[in-house]
Image (cartoon, rainbow, N blue to C red):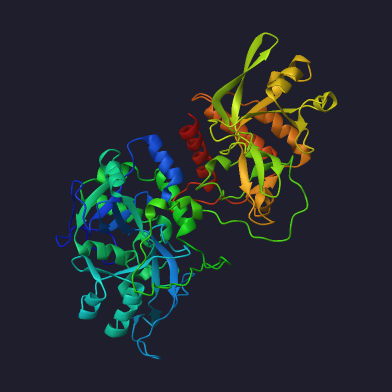
């Protein structure tokens, strides 16, 4: 039960609005709330890989025997829209006048005349704001004949239309863009998967609500924080895209009597990761000298909206753009020891957390790809060496998610590569030096021979399984492109020895050694290159440093996938 306090935008009781838990019954117009899992590991995996749908509020638009489709309601952006469906930075959206030179279609606040803009909501990853084929829809409450003719009713008093339909209503009724909520993107589930996630895993809760509740919340999310008069308006904290609609989610949980459950996860690791996702995907600074443009909106010739196959959509595919082509690079990177970016906001916070503060040895760089092995992730597995009748175990390190390209499809595990840093191996012709790094790649037989000959000790050996790979789509791609774009930094030859020796002190992974191993890895990473002491960057609405959050994300990644 909610209402709006005039000056502060806070909620209080009002008998005119209602919401209740439907006990799993779902239909068009239902509200689906994303619920944190009761399994801590499952929660961590969601926070690491699927931030977009955490604590989402989904309005169901279609329910079929095999598929359920909807739009996310509580993900406002600060992006505006110009004619032709080009996304623009905040404050630069199209100004719409019903009559040229008039103030019709504008609202006045004191002496200021404020233009109404097409403000974009993130509706889902399929056909989202940065998709090549955006899926656009508009919610509204214009119940005139024109409004009904070009729309479908979702809830009493709430209608859904296309962008063209919204513009037709404006032209016929004298409405404004601010009378509509423009959603870009959809989300959905296979029906069987949805019921399994709801009934078995407890990840979704279905709610029925009146249309007034939904409209009131959408109105409070409309504010644009860059507008100078925002402080004078009844804006909710969720109107800032960086808050990711968390307050709105808590409100609906309160309305269905689940306030204790909602507040248990407040300010959690998952909330912090969701806010960082929203900061990256939904919120853009006016100072950013970048062009956030969406492809032209071109409706099908028959006027029908295209149906996207959500079951085959890969959300990770759009997380990182490919490198930009340029002049071919002549310098080789084979043998280089590189470390992950030292940027205050780690590029590996929201995806590929295993690369955060990683140390990688580049072992191959050809026309098709660059390949390397991560050195700082010790696993729970060990490999046994037979040294003149004595069995000695050394820990196996995770080198990356790819197998050696020469391995057959039927092999279950990538091969092991043994690494050893010893000048004596060059003289003894044991192993193959990786570039000019002084680090030698060896077989198990090579390692045994070197140790038995007194050229090395067991403590000097790393056993690595798996590869990290950078595919080349143009001349500037590969690991060299990632280095130039700031995802990685080269470690100077003078520091390689110190980094290598520090990593050798890591122990086989266990619950008791995970924190110590991560500390050693961070120290080795820091040895690679001096880090400038810039002011910390904080997660929106918190006192948590984003670097500390990235460190915590890495720790949870290791525990979730290796322990």
Observer-nearest of 549 and 558: 558
Q: Is residue 273 above or below residue 452?
A: below
Q: Indicate left or right for 436 with 321 as reference.
A: right
Q: In the orientation shown, which residue stands out farthest toward the right?
A: 427
In the image, 229: left or right of 154?
A: right
Residue at 37% over, 62% down: 239
Among the 4 quarters of the image, the one containing residue 94: bottom left
Residue 435 seen from this side: yes
- Tell me where residue 1 appears, x and y as whole percent: 19, 56
Say which residue appears at 34% left-offset and 79% top-offset.
167
Question: Whole-percent x and y of residue 11?
Answer: 25, 58
Query: 302 or 252, which is in the foreground?
Result: 302
Q: Of residues 535 and 34, which is closer to you in this image?
A: 34
Residue 299 is left or right of residue 207, and the answer is right
Residue drawn where x is 75% and y is 14% of the image: 452
In percent of width and height, residue 37 lies at 33, 40
Q: Position of residue 284 (x, y in %)?
A: 49, 63
**Which quadrant would residue 261 be assigned to in this image?**
top left
Asked whether residue 529 is in view, the answer is no
Q: Residue furthest top?
A: 389
Q: How many marks?
A: 0
Q: In this picture, is 181 found above or below 490?
A: below
């Amino acid at each position: 039960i909610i209402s709006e306090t005039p000056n502060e935008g806070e909620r209080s009781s009002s008998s005119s609005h209602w919401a209740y838990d439907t006990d799993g019954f779902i239909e068009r117009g239902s509200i689906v709330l994303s619920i944190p899992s009761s399994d801590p590991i499952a929660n961590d995996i969601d926070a690491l890989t699927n931030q977009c749908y955490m604590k989402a509020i989904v309005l169901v638009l279609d329910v079929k025997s095999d598929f359920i489709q909807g739009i996310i309601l509580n993900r406002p952006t600060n992006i505006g829209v110009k004619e032709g469906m080009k996304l623009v930075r905040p404050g630069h959206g199209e100004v719409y006048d019903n009559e040229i030179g008039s103030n019709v279609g504008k609202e006045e606040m004191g002496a200021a005349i404020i233009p109404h803009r097409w403000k974009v909501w993130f509706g889902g990853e399929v056909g989202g704001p940065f998709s090549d084929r955006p899926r656009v829809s508009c919610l509204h409450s214009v119940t005139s004949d024109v409004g009904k003719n070009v729309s479908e009713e979702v809830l009493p008093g709430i209608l859904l239309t296309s962008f063209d339909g919204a513009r037709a209503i404006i032209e016929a009724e004298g409405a404004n863009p601010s009378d509509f909520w423009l959603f870009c993107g959809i989300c959905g589930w296979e029906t069987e998967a949805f019921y399994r996630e709801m009934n078995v895993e407890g990840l979704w809760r279905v709610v029925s609500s009146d249309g007034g509740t939904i409209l009131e919340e959408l109105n409070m999310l409309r504010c644009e924080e860059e507008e100078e008069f925002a402080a004078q308006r009844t804006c909710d904290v969720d109107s800032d895209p960086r808050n990711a609609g968390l307050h709105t989610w808590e409100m609906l949980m309160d309305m269905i009597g689940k306030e204790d459950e909602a507040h248990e996860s407040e300010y959690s690791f998952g909330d912090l990761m969701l806010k960082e996702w929203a900061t990256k995907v939904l919120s853009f600074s006016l100072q950013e000298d970048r062009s956030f443009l969406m492809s032209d909106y071109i409706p099908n010739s028959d006027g029908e909206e295209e149906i996207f196959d959500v079951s085959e959509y890969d959300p990770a595919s759009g997380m990182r753009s490919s490198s930009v082509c340029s002049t071919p690079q002549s310098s080789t990177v084979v043998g280089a020891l590189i470390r992950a970016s030292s940027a205050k906001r780690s590029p590996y916070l929201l995806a590929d957390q295993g690369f955060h503060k990683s140390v990688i040895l580049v072992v191959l760089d050809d026309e098709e790809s660059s390949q390397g092995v991560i050195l700082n992730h010790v696993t729970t597995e060990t490999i046994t060496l037979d040294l003149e009748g004595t069995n000695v175990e050394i820990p196996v390190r995770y080198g990356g998610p790819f197998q050696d390209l020469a391995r057959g499809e039927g092999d279950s595990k990538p091969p092991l590569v043994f690494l050893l840093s010893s000048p004596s191996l060059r003289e003894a012709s044991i192993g193959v030096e990786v570039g000019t790094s002084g680090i030698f790649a060896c077989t198990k037989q090579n390692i045994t021979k070197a140790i038995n000959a007194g050229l090395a000790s067991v403590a000097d050996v790393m056993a690595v399984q798996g590869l990290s790979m950078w595919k080349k789509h143009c001349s500037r791609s590969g690991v060299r492109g990632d280095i130039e774009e700031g995802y990685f930094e080269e470690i100077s030859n003078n520091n390689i020895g110190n980094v290598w020796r520090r990593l050798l002190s890591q122990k086989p992974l266990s619950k008791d050694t995970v924190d110590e191993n991560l500390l050693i890895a961070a120290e080795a990473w820091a040895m690679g290159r001096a880090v400038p002491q810039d002011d910390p960057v904080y997660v929106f609405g918190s006192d948590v440093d984003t670097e500390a959050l990235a460190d915590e994300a890495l720790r949870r990644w290791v525990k979730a996938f290796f322990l």
